[in-house]
Each structure stands twice: as structure tokens, then as C-alpha cells.
Image (cartoon, grey):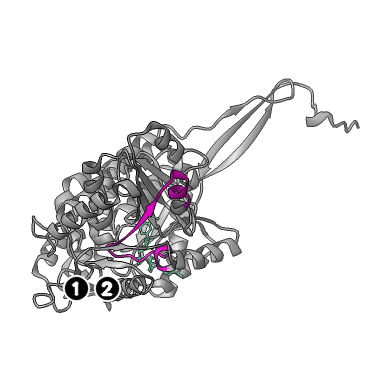
Amino acid sequence: MHIPVTKLMASLGVAPQALRAGDLLSLSPIDGQALAQVHAAALPDVASAVERAHAAYLRWRLVPAPQRGELVRLLGDELRANKQALGELVTLEVGKVSSEGLGEVQEMIDICDFAVGLSRQLYGLTIASERPGHRMMETWHPLGVVGVITAFNFPVAVWAWNAALALVCGDAVIWKPSEKAPLCALAVQALFERACQRFGQPELTQDLCQVLNGHADVGQALVDNPKVALISATGSTRMGRAVGQSVAARFGRSLLELGGNNAIIVAPSADLDMAVRAVAFAAAGTAGQRCTSARRLIVHDSVYDELVGRLKKAYASFTIGPPTEPATLLGPLIDLAAFEAMQLALTQAAGGGGVVTGGARVLQDRYADAFYVSAALVEMPAQTDVVRHETFAPILYVLKYQTLEQAIALNNEVPQGLSSAIFTTDLREAEAFMSAAGSDCGISNVNIGTSGAEIGGAFGGEKETGGGRESGSDAWRAYMRRATNTINYSSALPLAQGVRFDI
Ligand code: NAD
């Protein structure tokens, strides 16, 4: 067992016994070695957790929203105080380089701050009534139990995006984390419990947030439970297709954050120095394991040779290695399956006429059980099936274009619709890209890459990405139910639309 993990977990409030409490294995992608074996929920545990969460919701929904915000403020304090340790744990369990592990915790802190402010701004509208002496308004009420299912690649931040908003909205939360990152979930839960202690009203916070570690069957049991009002699920399109259909079958609500296949267009007027840096981070950062990672580069004919040449140089300079070493830019893939999927995609791309640079396994002598790769650039003659498919690895397919219409058509001609970007200094091109006839993605950026969103905006995408929106803007509405109220303060009873019913 890794020595640092016991110490790290203890500092975050997780007892050493929890690290050998069951048979769900946590492996570090840094060296493939076991970190811990934690308890996995059994299916009956899911039903009882939902019952307890529902009871917690019935109490919590009556607490005024700004007081609910106080609990989230305390959670933010715990995260601030433990940012370093939690960031290190993210690095250890999913292999993100240190600055990204810390960045993920910063994102949790940011969304807590956002949610605290939001707790005083859960506004409804007042609406003009067509009847004299009447007034209409909307009120927003807590929704119920929110089931949060998360992916391995954002093992802490995605819970926070959901939980911070759900808590101020008056909901209870049950979290089914990725089976590849159970320790991160235990640590976050421990920090939440510390915040509850400081909140000092255990009768209100009991069972308000719970964690159910386990595999897909645990998630599916949560999805099928009619007392879970909202399922917010982040992961592959394959998972979302199953989850979305199950939730719809019981008329539940779902918020789906699924796969992306994000493109960057580089136009003739682009600042190529910026484009090279942005593309390198977006495509190779996090070893290509972000939902917003750039997977396609659509380059104008006139700048193609220069840009691709410079990118190849940049790619050759990446330091690949353990994410704990300060110089490392490219850490490991999460596991063998990710490595095999990458190799299969590269073989298929080559079979379709692609010219592959990079993509091989490295550091195999030092880390026989871990999967480090060099980032791959693949020059493609056309947008073939393999390019249209999300492979969760550092592969960047490069395509050429002649007109902006062609570039936008290529951008949109994939099943996914998460993030997109254009590098241009031409105002007309930038606006066209963001217009109704432009990118069809939930995120479309100008002169920055596809990844690295801030929490202030609504995050999510269209088509096979699932249509959900999380985090900032008005994403909070997904966690509440809306009531329309019509109030008659006159002494008459006129019916709408002039209907008469005189008795
Ligand atoms: P995954 O789909 O394998 O697993 C995600 C989660 O879903 C896990 O907790 C898993 O146990 C659970 N799950 C799987 N099948 C389920 C089912 N039938 N019912 C209930 N739960 C089920 O994804 P992953 O490999 O962990 O993550 C990578 C994927 O996630 C990529 O496709 C990536 O694009 C996507 N992702 C999307 C976003 C986004 O915001 N759009 C963010 C991060 C990751």
C-alpha cells in the first residue's frame, strides 16, 4: 500500500480502517499499485440511503436558503484549508499533474462561493395577469433527493458543482462516485462532515449528503429509485443513454453531462503563438482525459504547414512522467483499457489514411503496471468514423479546410456537442462562429482552447453530450421545482380568456 495515502487520508479526516474496509480496489494510475480497498455499497444500501436522504430533504427544505448557504460557506472553508491535501489525493488516485489536482479543488471552492451568493438570489418572476385585480408569480421550491453520478476524470469538482447548488436549493444529495476514484469521494465526504459539525445543527444535516461507492449497478439502483427526483450523471455517452432512458421511464428528471469531441478551428488570421500553446494544453493536458479536451484541429490551408510543424515540435518537448514531479506535463492514462482504446483508435486512423506522429507507450521499464504515452497528432485526409468517435486519450486529429463554412460544418458534423473554439483575429469570423449558424456546441470560445471552463458560466453540451447544464448562470434551476402562482386580490372571479361559467 502507498504510504502517503494513509497519512493524506488521515489529514483529510478519513480513518485508516476505511482504507481496508471492503473489496473495492483503488489503484493509482501513477504506478498501477493498490492504494486501498474500500467498502462498496450493496444494492439494499441504496434503497435505505435514499429513504434517509428523503427524510433529510423534508427537514432541509424548511431551512431558509441563506442559512443553507452558510453550510456551503463552511464547506468552502474546509476545502480552502485542505486544498493541498485533497489536490494531492486527486493526483495520487487519478494521475492528474499537481497543478491540475489543485485546480480541481479550487474549482470546488469557487462553486461554493458562487452558491453562497446564490442562496440569496433564488429569484422567481412576477408576471402581468390579464385579469383585473390579479397578480401572477413564479416561486422556486426545493426539489428532493439529487443523485449525483460522476466520472473518474473530475473525481471531486463535479460533485461540488452539483452538491453546492443542490444544498442551497434545499435538496439532499447521494453521490455515486467513479469506481476508479473512491478515495476522493471518502475524503470529500469527510470534509463535508467537518463543515456540518461546525454548522452545529446535526438534526438538520444528518444524511444530507451521502456517498455510495461502487460500480455501475449501484448507480443504476439510484437511477431506478422513484424517490430520487433528479439524477445528475457525468460520464460516457454509453452510460448516459442507459441512465437517461431509465430516468425518463419513471418520469424522473435527469441532467446529463456526457462525452465530447471538441474541435479547434485555426483561421488564416489567427495568432499562431497563442494557438500553439492553447492547442497543446487543450489536446495533451490531463493526458487528453477531459470531456472538453481538444480532439480535432481544423486548420486553414494557408497556415496548416506552419501550425502543424510548430505543434509537432511542441509535442516532442512535453515531459511525460509521474504527475507528482513538478516538470511533468503529461501524466498517465487512467488504466490499461484506456491505453488499449487509444492504440485501437490510432490503428483505425492509420487504416483510414491518417499519418500518425507519437502515441506510443513510454516509461514501460519503470512502470510496468502504469500506462504513460506520448501525445499523438494524426493528420487525417477526412473526418472518418474514428475521428467522429470520442477516444478518451491524447489523440488530436488534424484536418484541413478552405472556407469558414467548411470548417463550421466539420465542427458540427459529429454526434457530440460539448466544446469548440476558433482562433481568429477577424471579428466577422469570430461572430459567425458564435452565431446561430455557427458552432452547435454548448461552449464556443474565441482565442482560447476548448478546455478549462470557469464556474461562472453554465457548463454542458448538446446532442450526444446530453443537453444538461451545470455550475454557473441559471443552472441552479435544474435543482428546484417551479410553481406558478396566480393570486386574485379583487372581489370578482373573472375567468381567463373571457370564458364564462355563470351560476
Ligand atoms: P463512465 O461512463 O464509464 O462512468 C461514469 C460513471 O457512471 C461511473 O460512476 C460509473 O460507475 C457510472 N455508470 C456507468 N454505467 C452506469 C449505469 N448504467 N447506471 C448508472 N451509473 C452508471 O465514464 P468514465 O470513464 O468514468 O469517464 C469518462 C467519460 O466521461 C468520457 O466520455 C467523458 O467525456 C465524460 N465526461 C463528461 C463530462 C461532462 O461534463 N460532459 C465531464 C467529465 C467526463
Decide which of 268, 160 is in the foreground and name it: 268
Q: Quadrant of the C terminus?
A: top right
Which residue is pictured at 23% across the width and 49% down the height? 306
Which residue is pictured at 10% across the width and 65% down the height? 4
Badge 2 marks a residue whose secondary structure is helix
Find residue 165 and report its horizontal and vertical position in percent. Answer: 39, 45
Q: How many marks?
A: 2
Find residue 285 and report its horizontal and vertical position in percent. Answer: 23, 55
Residue under label 2, please give it: 339
Give, as a single range, the part of the protein colored magenta: 386-409
Dot 2 or dot 1: first in sequence order is 2
Q: Amino acid at mark 2?
A: Phe
Query: Does the closest atom of ligand 1 sit within 8 Å of the Cβ of label 1?
Result: no
Cα gap from disc 2 to disc 1, whole angstroms: 8 Å
| Dots 2, 1 in contact, CB < 8 A | yes
Residue 226 horizontal side relative to residue 396, left or right: right
For residue 455, above or below residue 320: above
Badge 1 marks a residue whose secondary structure is strand
Q: Does the segment drawn in magenta span residue 403?
A: yes
Residue under label 1, please give it: 361
| Ligand 1 image position (quadrant) | bottom left
Locate residue 391: give its quadrant.
Answer: bottom left
Q: Amino acid at mark 1?
A: Arg
